[in-house]
Image (spheres, helix red, strand yellow):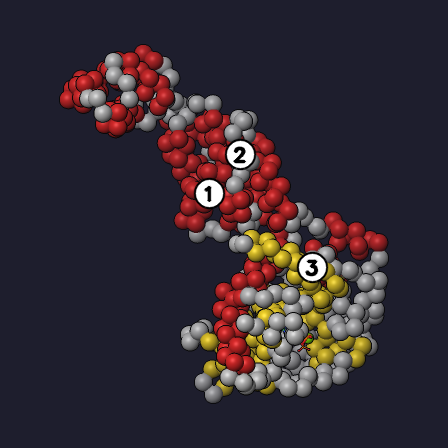
Amino acid sequence: MYQAFIGLEVHIHLLAQTKVFCTCRSAFGDEPNTNVCPVCMGYPGVLPVLNIEAMRMGCVVARALNCHIPEKTWFERKQYFYPDMTKNYQISQFASPLGQRGYLDLEGRGIKKRVRIHECHLEEDAGKMIHSGNVSLLDYNRAGVSLLEIVTEPDMERGEEAELFIQQLRRMVRYLGVCDGNMEEGSLRADANVSINLPGKGLGRKVEIKNLNSSRFVKLGLNYEIIRQGALLDAGKTVVQETRLWNENRDETAPMRTKENAHDYRYFPEPDLPIFEPDAAFLASVDASMVELPLARASRMASQYKLSEEQVDLICEEKALADYFEEAVAAASVPDAAFRISNLLLSDIRHLLARSGADPCAIAKFRLTPKRLAELVTMLGEGRVSQKIVKQTIDLVLAEDKDPSAIIAEHNWGQITDTAVIDAAVQAVLETEAAALAELQTNANDKRRKSIGAYLVGKVLSATGGRADPKLVRSRLEQSAAGCF
Ligand code: ADP
Ligand code: ZN
Ligand code: MG
């Protein structure tokens, strides 16, 4: 058995409106080469200016990852040639990353582990090269977009841990509102480094799997590599230090380039940008952007609302959903509101959201506002409407954008608790169900009586359009039929 070491380098696009060193729009999907200017195109003599918003967002992530933010942080030029980078160097951070020595606690799916963060640094993204037949096309809209690179220590050992790391990080940056976490669009991408060695022998020779755009590929690629490298060592061979790519069609990694000697990027301090010294006002703005982070929020909510781990995990997946839930619970005035709201949220409401094509974040614009949901759940909890009516009402709230109480009043959907009305319905049903009634009164089999009882309750309920109080129907029926079930 070998010991495996996994370290991740995750790049996230920050949601700053403009690029990191110029004022071009930072957007995905615009017409190619429309968001460009002399600065991000690297014309000679132009001067970059640091986008403070990007720096603030970077520091927010650093803080959420428990990193130290140094008193001075600056930028270096990283020299290399590639057609997607017209300057022939990338402005990045080398000696003084904005976040240093932090950690992220992995928790869930049987994993509990602290992963140390080596650093977080701010840099500019390169353009995008699209290969098509025997031409290559270049889109520089992405060149200069602010990118935060998060580098972990090689503390993970299995693909599953790395997958969870990516998922937790993604959820965290979305909570913080600094990255949309869209891996398909490349807003969050990862390079995964992995080596194996005999236990106790320390790190092995690492292989880097580049440009993984899904957390599942991170897991699959790493687990594939661990097996591939193990087979090489078993056969007495050595692992070549190289960069590989995940081939999602063949479910395997394949070599991209060997990287035997580390690149010499000739880093040197960027002479056109001053050293950045975060002052009290800047640090206060970083603090002001902190929110309760997903894991902490989930564990608070589990105990505060007495919900299961599974329920809070689902509710806390998106901050907007968790906010919605807590707002609705606060507005409702029945004791078991949290339980009822969580049930509705995780069944009907989630399906309705999904059907309307909206992602859970769109819940903020949902016609069934937390206040309206609270009103409905309060009526349900007080026995003024039935579960069935709740569903019908939700459909109409969405269709007509009205308050539940107005809809229920308008359709006369309030629960029937008047025993005279219920008795009349019971009587009518018993008259048409003479055989069932006779069996209910004579059959000694409890199970059989129970199922006949349920059948008759259902008949009465449907005779009242689902409005009769089911508990009351049951007790009146037992009385009228002189049969228990
Ligand atoms: P490089 O200079 O090749 O970029 P770094 O030392 O900067 O390498 O590390 C990059 C990433 O690779 C980090 O996430 C680190 O944890 C991980 N890493 C470094 N060495 C190893 C190793 N021997 N095995 C597994 N991961 C490693
Ligand atoms: Zn520009
Ligand atoms: Mg490195």
Residue 213 on image: x %, y %: 53, 68
Gap between marks 1 and 3 measured at Cα: 32 Å
Amino acid type, residue under disc 3 in the picture: Tyr
Q: Is mark 1 within 8 Å of ligand 1?
A: no
Amino acid type, residue under disc 2 in the picture: Ala
Nearer mark to the viewer, of 2 and 3: 3
In the depicted structure, whether residue 294 falls above or below residue 29: above
> What residue is at 57 percent from the left and 44 percent from the top?
322
Q: Quadrant of ligand 3?
A: bottom right
> What residue is at 75 percent from the left and 74 percent from the top?
94
Please name the residue that numbered disc 3 is placed on: 103
Please name the residue that numbered disc 2 is placed on: 338
Q: Is mark 2 within 8 Å of ligand 1?
A: no
Residue 409 on image: x %, y %: 42, 24
Where does the C terminus fall, quadrant-wise?
top left
> What residue is at 75 percent from the left and 78 percent from the top?
77
Q: Is residue 301 left or right of residue 286?
A: left
Amino acid type, residue under disc 1 in the picture: Leu
Image quadrant assignment for residue 384: top left
SS at mark 2 in the image: helix
Q: Is residue 384 left or right of residue 476?
A: right
Where does the N terminus fall, quadrant-wise?
bottom right
Residue 187 on image: x %, y %: 58, 65
Residue 396 on image: x %, y %: 40, 36
Using the image as rendered, state which of residue 358 and residue 251 is in the foreground. 251
SS at mark 1 in the image: helix
Does the CB distance between marks 1 and 2 fall below 8 Å? no
Q: Please report whichever mark, 1 or 3, sits nearer to the chain's N-terminal start.
A: 3
Gap between marks 2 and 3 measured at Cα: 33 Å
Residue 346's disc number: 1
SS at mark 3 in the image: strand
